[in-house]
Amino acid sequence: MASGLKIKVNEREWSVSASPDTPLLYVLSNELMLQGPRFGCGLAQCGSCSVLVNGVETRSCVTPVSAVVGKSVTTLEGLPAWYAVQKKLAETPALHPMQQAVIDEQALQCGYCYNGMIVKASEFLSKTPRPTEAQIRTAMNGHLCRCGTYPRIIQAVQRAARAMSEVKA
Amino acid sequence: MTLRRDFLKAGGALVIGFRLRDDLLGQEKAAPARGTMAGPPDAKQVDTWLAIHSDNTATVYIGFAELGQGNSTALLQVAAEELDFDMSQLQTVRLDTNVTPNQGGTYSSASIQRGGPQVRTAAAEARQALLQLASKKLDAPVNSLSVSKGVVAVVGEASRSVTYGELVGDQPFHLAFTGSAPVKTPAEYKIVATAVPRNDMPDKVSGKYVYMQHVRVPGMLHGRVVRPRGQGAYGAGAKVLALDESSIRNISGARVLRKGDFIGVVAESEWDAIRAARQLKITWDSTPSLSGSDGLYEAMRAAKTDDRIVLQRGNAADAIGAAPHKVAYSCRSPYQAHAPFGPNCALADVGPDSALVMCSTQDVYATRSTLAGILGLAVAKVRVQYYEGSGTYGHSCYDDVAQAAALLSQLAGKPVRLQFMRWDEHGWDNYGPSHLGEVRAAAGADGKIVGYEYEGWQHHWSNVETSEQLALGKPAAEWQPNPAMQVNPLCCGGMYDIPNLRLVNHHVPGLGYLKCAWLRSPLDLSFSFTSEQAIDQLAFLLKLDPYEFRQRNIKDARWLGVLDAAAKAANWAPRTAASNLAKANTVANIVGGRGIGMGTHLASYGAAVAEIEVNRETGKVVAKHLYGAVDAGLVVNPGNVESQISGQLVQTASRMFHEEVTFTRTNVTSLDWASYPILRFEECPQVTPVVVQRLNERSTGAGEEVMAAAAGAIANAFFDATGVRMNEFPFTPKRVLAALKRG
Ligand code: FES
Ligand code: FES
């Protein structure tokens, strides 16, 4: 029943068997077996399923897979390589600086919302290298955390911003 | 024990998520995947707790769920400390009724309180046995040996050494607890009481961590339940009047499964299951079964209750009557939802005579026995494995989803993965109970509290999950009373030195109300919201600074310790409450206030200070900075506990300002993040967590011990800012404007 759609995820081409109207999230989870994007609400309310589509944070739970044909999708798993390309680094680091910053700040609790947090923060930092705290809060406001780790996420974004400003291609 | 070890070796892949499928497919060659063992292993055997491997590492079997609070790291710290292992040499395994000991569920933030001593004793026993073996092997007396990183050496002769791994490598100890092995004293601690980084974070940031929601097995179907959007009254169930299977005919491969009023759909593709659940036409009986949120408190107050005195000393009524300064308040608080960020999920493989159920239960053993009953299998034939979901903060739908997955698998004859939709989780939760509190308190002219009375109205926890109720018609029932669901002395006056005190619990039978269960620091926010405002008001009447007034009325050094710690962190400067009203910034109409509060859950000590802002024009309230101090005895991992305190403070702000389950006379209407808003980044307060470390006191809970205090502090800050007392939360703009108008 392959729909024959071809999508590009984390710099690799995949052919998809799901029907074109299937939300991208279910293709990423059940066909590509990726664990970054994950179900939270299915309503574009929480950010649990976020991915980058051509570098723009997108809710995969409400985006039909057909809508990303011809575009480039990056998931949590692909962020280090995405970052390396952006920064023109010779080698792909093990983690995106935002991922490292979350560990360094010991920020997460259950960590379930951190797919969205890290994806969104990575997008934001790529456009806003020296953010103020108010800018961080505004940018991240569409992402929820039930464990209440917002203060440490803010610190992690600030830490990642510092780390990224020190990286030279 | 050997059996269990063999199983672990064979099933070692279990901890690596996707290899799981191999086990399920190759049941003959690998270990049995479905239940075949009675479990739990014998808690008196050291082997139940610990295995030393030949590569000089060890596995610690911990019977507590990692709920995202870092408790598995902390329990490994305890083991590493006693064994003189490095943290990097230790690992733990997933909770599994066939593998890990029954430590009684991960409740009341008590993993460290209950599990710490067990793990500590087992590790100490093992170390003692290992040293005896080493003594023989090295031909040196035990007291001449020292251990570092699992290497035993003769002191002063480093070349004479042997590793734990060489001594017992992969063999069981066959050792019962002697109870005689010495444990280390706090002065000797090197790993305990330090902020060891959590071991789950690297995989969680990279996407390698396997949450329950990620688990898949070959040949499985995707399932969804079909229920009315939003539950009606507990016990009323949901009655199917008509079901039209042809309504999903266009979704090939989707099937309707039914047992009683329990309805689900399954399909090979997850999207088909979701579409089918959405499209399936069912006519539900919509006879009203609820009071509606508007009539709730009146109904509770008028209910025929089961009353008991929780605590009584002296004669509170007389003492209050005779005192010069007195206050009386009645406060209300709503049902609130667990609303885990990722709705619960389970995967069940139910065969004719055995079952494997993977889920995010807080208690694999309790879940197993309920499942066995529902499936009609012997308990030993059901195996339950724990996979972490998103933070649950109490009894969310994890049992319900496990039961539903098991029922669907049994009906389908195939493994079924069931992910609840957002509205299933929000709408069919076991909500944190609503509460009605009445407090009366009085103080003498000398600033001493002389009398205190608290009466609380609330439900007990519901005992029957929705799935079993719908499928089997199991009648609704409630738990027998226990301290976590009754008026809590540690929030209601118990921290103060009050000669005349009376706490009364009015149990409002839960039938006809919403289904309830424990939600992080159950009921405590409500208790402290009510009680701490009364204490604060006494200080106000006496023209005393509220911190100083509390100091005067506390004798217990540990309560004083947290109070002082919170006040110090917040740079508390003495003044009476509401004494800054004139200075309000009338231009922007935003007024600031600060408040202090106390209270805790079951065994620790908590105090908090809140700094908030109230917009008098819009009614919007925002917490600017929250400070929380917790004394939880010996804190094994202060880093984790700081993180826990921060999370509690933020969650308290969310619950005080935003969270409220709404319902009509037929059903709950809080079904997602739009109809049940929670705190977001833009309104998030700054937080200052303070751990009051007590190395020589036994460890107690730290995952929910400062929320009550913070709720009281927020309420008192509101009074400081406005001169008005709130009698109901959440502080929605509408409620705030009404209160300000009332004055
Ligand atoms: S799951 Fe997509 S936004 Fe919530
Ligand atoms: S860390 Fe648990 S939801 Fe954010």
Image: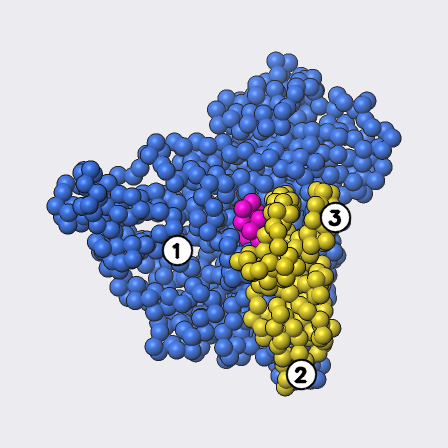
Chain colours: A yellow, B blue
Point out which mark residue A138 bears. Answer: 3
Q: Is residue B315 above or below residue A31?
A: above
Magenta segment, which residues? A99-111
In what element is the residue under mark 1?
strand
**Which amino acid type is shown beneath numbered disc 2?**
Ser
* Mark 1: C-beta under 8 Å from nearest atom of ligand 2: no
Residue that carries the numbered disc 1 in the rendered image: B92
Horizontal side of B724 relative to A15 (left or right) equals right
Is residue B340 shown above or below B563? Answer: below
Q: Tell me if B55 is positioned left or right of B628 in this view.
A: left
Say what amino acid the circle numbered 1 marks. Answer: Thr
Residue name at image x 33 percent, y 66 percent: B9
Return the x and y of residue B409 as percentages of the image width and height. 52, 75
Dots 1 and 3: beta carbons under 8 Å? Answer: no
Residue B562 in sight in this render: yes
Secondary structure under tag 3 reads helix
Question: What separation in Å lies between label 1 and label 3 (alpha carbons)?
Answer: 40 Å
**Residue lying at the far right of the rendered structure:** B587
Residue A63, picture quadrant: bottom right
- Numbered-mark total: 3
Q: State if disc 3 and disc 2 touch (CB < 8 Å).
A: no
Q: Position of residue B607 (x, y in %)?
A: 57, 31
Quadrant position of the N terminus of chain B in the picture: bottom left
Q: Nearer the viewer, mark 1 or mark 2?
A: 2
Residue at screen point 40% across, 47% down: B75
Name the spot of residue B417 as percent of width and height, x first. 55, 71
Question: What is the x, y in percent for residue B442?
Answer: 63, 22
Task: Tell me the CA gap for discs 2 and 3.
Answer: 39 Å
User: Which residue, given by chain and number where applicable, does mark 2 sit on?
Assistant: A3
Q: Badge 3 sits on which subunit?
A: A
Q: Amino acid at mark 3?
A: Thr
